[in-house]
Amino acid sequence: MALSRQDLEHVARSPGWRERRVEVIETGAGKVVVKGQRAPRHPARYQILNALAGLLRAPWLKAAPMHGGARAQAVEVERLRALRAAGAPVPELLHVARDHLVMQWLGDEHLGLLLERRHPHALALWREAAGALLRLHAAGQYLSQGFARNMIVDTRTDPPRLAGVIDFEDDPLEALTLPQAQARDW
């Protein structure tokens, strides 16, 4: 999937991703997700979570640093490239600009919603996501936030299938070992 110069100009002019940070835009190549940079978050809640993880002697509960801004975007770009190279089902990265990135749109639905709605294929999708996670771990990789809301399902297929995983603005290896990061995924 390649974006034309006109597509990139349209993306750059769009106010949506600046106002809401994430926007789905129709391009000549199809739908894409434009993700603007997030302002850095206050570290207090992460410090509390890390203190709680220490008290519980559960290091896999530690929070990965949430940098925000250009550093978070660089982390996401790096993680997307590493995961894709390892064969993980992640969106294709289509363009990186100073203040935003553009990636392949995977769909509107996520596994969390389908589980909550008791979709007829919810259990099969959960198993598919678990299998994808096992393959990802076997390739020496890990997610960032392995939540069902970050597991996108393509409901246009029959039966629906896992389209991929998203949201990689933080890198757990900045705070955890690889086995801890993989345990955190579960």
Image: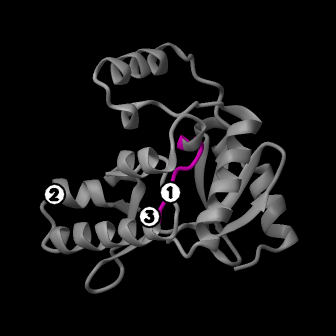
Q: Nearer the viewer, mark 3 or mark 2?
A: 3
How would you classify the magenta stretch by its main secondary structure? loop
From this view, report whether residue 8 is shown above or below residue 20: below
The numbered mark at residue 137 is: 3
- Residue 130, quarter of the rendered image: bottom left
- Dividing the picture into quarters, in which one does residue 112 lie? bottom left
Residue type at mark 1 is Ile
Q: Point out the tag, 3 or 2, that comes first from the N-terminus.
A: 2
- Identified by mark 3, the residue type is His
Q: Is residue 89 left or right of residue 19?
A: left
Residue at image location 59% in from the left, 51% down from the top: 23
- Specify few, some or many for label 3: CA neighbours under 10 Å numbering under 14, 14-19, or 20 or more: many
What range is drawn magenta here?
164-172
Q: CA distance from mark 2 to mark 1?
A: 21 Å
Is residue 15 at all visible to an observer of this figure? no
Check the image and name the residue furthest to the right. Answer: 5
How crowded pointer 2 is (Cα within 10 Å; few <14, some 14-19, many 20+) is rated as few
Q: Is residue 48 left or right of residue 85?
A: left
- Give the residue at the far bottom of this rendering: 158
Q: Is residue 97 above or below residue 170?
A: below
Label 1, on which residue? 166
State which quadrant residue 121 falls in.
bottom left
Real-space CA distance between mark 3 and mark 2, rounded to the nearest whole angstrom: 29 Å
Tell me: 73 left or right of 58.
right
Q: Position of residue 152 (x, y in %)?
A: 40, 63
Q: SS for tag 1?
A: loop
Residue 70 at x, y = what percent?
A: 76, 37
**Is 102 or 88 nearer to us in this picture?**
88
Q: Which residue is tagged 2?
A: 117
